[in-house]
Amino acid sequence: MRQISIYRYARFFINLYAFCRLKPIPPPVSPTLGPEDVTVIIPCLATDGLAELQRTIESVLQAEPYETILSTVDANRPRVDKLVSEMPALKLGRVRVVSTSHPNKRIQMARAIPEVRTCITLFADDDVTWPGSILTWMLAPFEREDTGGVVTCQRLRRPESFRSVTQRIFYFLGAIYLERRNFDCGATNYIDGGMPCLSGRTVAYRTKIVQDEAFTDRFTNEMWLYNKSVKADDDNFISRWMVSHHWRTYIQYHQRCEVQTTLEDNWKFIAQCLRWSRSNWRSNLKSLFWERDVWL
């Protein structure tokens, strides 16, 4: 037990030092990339109310990317088409909708990726809120040619009011989960350039990486034990792909590119954590014993 405690606190203080040393890459005075070089892909189901999705789209459009592609399912496409059609005419030409026959985030992403015509592809969840300056800051690390993926820090969006004490408790648990994640990603990225996972809530990649045929084939056909198809875990897969193909990754930890998101604020949060836990164990085992690129 003593040895475990020593390891635990040694790891904490090393990570704390690394996190404090982490600095964001400021946007250059004369950048080679701008928001017009970014296409945003938002996989969405649109099964519930569309208010959250509308908030996300409006937030994304404020950052002025070249184009935003909503990838949904055929059954719900009319609802998404109607939402887009009701947006101001000025913004209408910057949003497109594509769809797949079945709800599968990987397939929905793969459906939209070939539509991208810019050199940077950015994936975002359908429940995020962006600051207007996010693209300028996320593009700064891409000034290095060997940078393949960039993520940002995340915060839990505070509700306008709390309905109960239970909701406050789960909100607190969700908030510290994201804070711990920011801490771990920032520390490990400073130490050796690695990262536990490039979160799919908001992440940018060079388009040539995700449009590669080998990537698409592996991404949409990943298998687990007993030839079981993996439908979730898209961000873990791409994170491992970055490592195996020797691309540099970076976390931009700055308020100007801070993403706000939502998590479950009830007992469903426990189920959310269990899903993340299963995904992380599966991905970590594949990294350590199947792919083994992390040992090289």
Image (cartoon, helix red, strand yellow):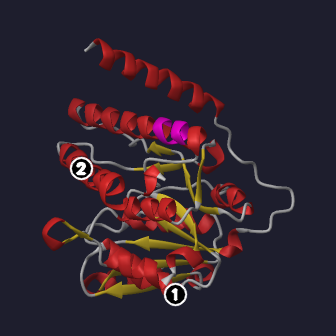
Mark 1 crowd level (few <14, some 14–19, many ≥20, 10 Å Cα): some
Residue at 28% x, 75% y: name it: 104
Residue at 72% x, 57% y: name it: 140
Cα separation between marks 2 and 1: 31 Å
Q: In the displayed orientation, state which residue is furthest to the right.
A: 30
Residue at 43% x, 45% y: name it: 157
Tell me which numbered mark, 2 or 1, is placed earlier along the sequence: 1
- The answer to whether residue 189 is seen in the rendering is yes
Residue 233, image x and y in percent? 32, 62
User: Which residue is labeled 1 in the image?
Assistant: 115
Start-end of magenta stretch:
183-188
Q: Amino acid at mark 1?
A: Glu
Q: Is residue 201 magenta?
A: no
Q: Amino acid at mark 2?
A: Gln
Q: Is the magenta region chiefly helix, strand or loop?
A: helix
For the residue pair 289 and 201, the one nearer the viewer reads as 289
For the residue pair 212 and 55, the one nearer the viewer reads as 212
Mark 2 crowd level (few <14, some 14–19, many ≥20, 10 Å Cα): few
- The answer to whether residue 52 is seen in the rendering is no
